[in-house]
Amino acid sequence: MAERILVRRNSYRDSAFLMRIGRRVAALPGLAEAVVLMATEMNRRLLEDAGFPPERFAGAGPMDIVVALRAATAEQLDAAEREALELLRQAPAATGAAARVRPGSVREAIAERASLNLVSIAVPGPYAAYLAHQALDAGRHVFLFSDNVPLEDEVALKRRAAELGLLVMGPDCGTAIVAGTGLGFANRVPRGAVGIVGASGTGIQEIACLVAAAGEGISQAIGTGGRDLSAAVGGRMTEFGARLLAEDPETKVIVVAAKHPDDEVAARL
């Protein structure tokens, strides 16, 4: 079995776009494995766990893309490399309203859609807090898909959001359902009386699907990002999200999803 690892420096793409590329490349003849991802610390560990030699991508950082390929022959690797690089050169296709000229800033986007109360942000982690603060300045809730956001930025964002009575879902928030609209990797489930607030995107997805399979639906599903229940963040958005669900007349049952919460934070909540 032959392997090849490519590193594209300073080439940020969001994880959903990279996952689609990985699936397309993996479907080529002879490919045993095709992984396309940002070289965050966690993703580098995933590559190492998959058996790819860590010294081949040790110098890659969170602003770099890694393409890791495994195939039966060198010719198949060549074809997979060409396909991956061509797909990476393409911008995600825009259709409908999204195909028009994009606003150059969060403030411009809000000015164009003044009636909307939530901003979704998916940019490289070092820039995410700056844009999220702009959304909070404008009185908007934030769905922060970006990962690799410094912990101190998350603490500051959530402290400020709580003072303003706004949600910051994330960073690294992959799932939410707000007023029936799925954000990130949300499941299509019916509306109903069960509200979820969670620091685990896959946990929210699993609960939502189990609720739907039992014949009930989801009122709202509020993701918080995986670090919300840490001692540093203090569960600010979990607590605020649960309070919002408790005040929501459509929500009759509240489920909290968590992974490894801090003991003191869990006891307080």
Image (spheres, rainbow, N blue to C red):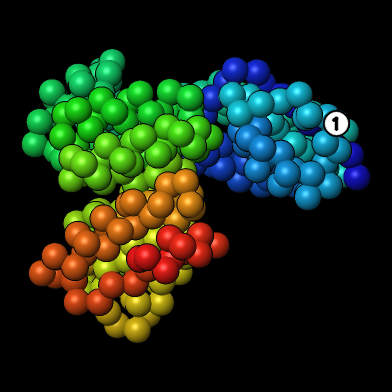
Q: Quadrant of the N terminus?
A: top right
Q: Quick check: 167 above or below 138? A: below
Tag 1: Cα neighbours inside 10 Å, few (<14), some, or many (≥20)? few
**Residue shown at 24% from the left, 45% from the top:** 162
Question: x, y percentage for residue 268?
Answer: 37, 65
Q: Quick check: 175 above or below 252? A: above
**Residue shown at 83% from the left, 29% from the top:** 56
**137 vs 265, nearest the viewer:** 265
Question: x, y percentage for residue 143?
Answer: 32, 42
**Residue shown at 70% from the left, 32% from the top:** 67
Q: Quick check: 70 above or below 175? A: above
Identify residue for label 1.
55
**Residue shown at 22% from the left, 62% from the top:** 243
**141 vs 51, nearest the viewer:** 141
Left or right: residue 101 versus residue 21 is left
Residue 147 seen in render:
yes
Judged from the image, the secondary structure of the residue bearing numbered disc 1 is: helix
Q: Quadrant of the C terminus?
A: bottom left
Residue 225 seen in render:
no
Callout count: 1
Residue type at numbered disc 1: Glu
Question: x, y percentage for residue 28?
Answer: 70, 43
Question: x, y percentage for residue 99?
Answer: 28, 25
Which quadrant of the view contains residue 117? top left
Left or right: residue 102 versus residue 114 is right
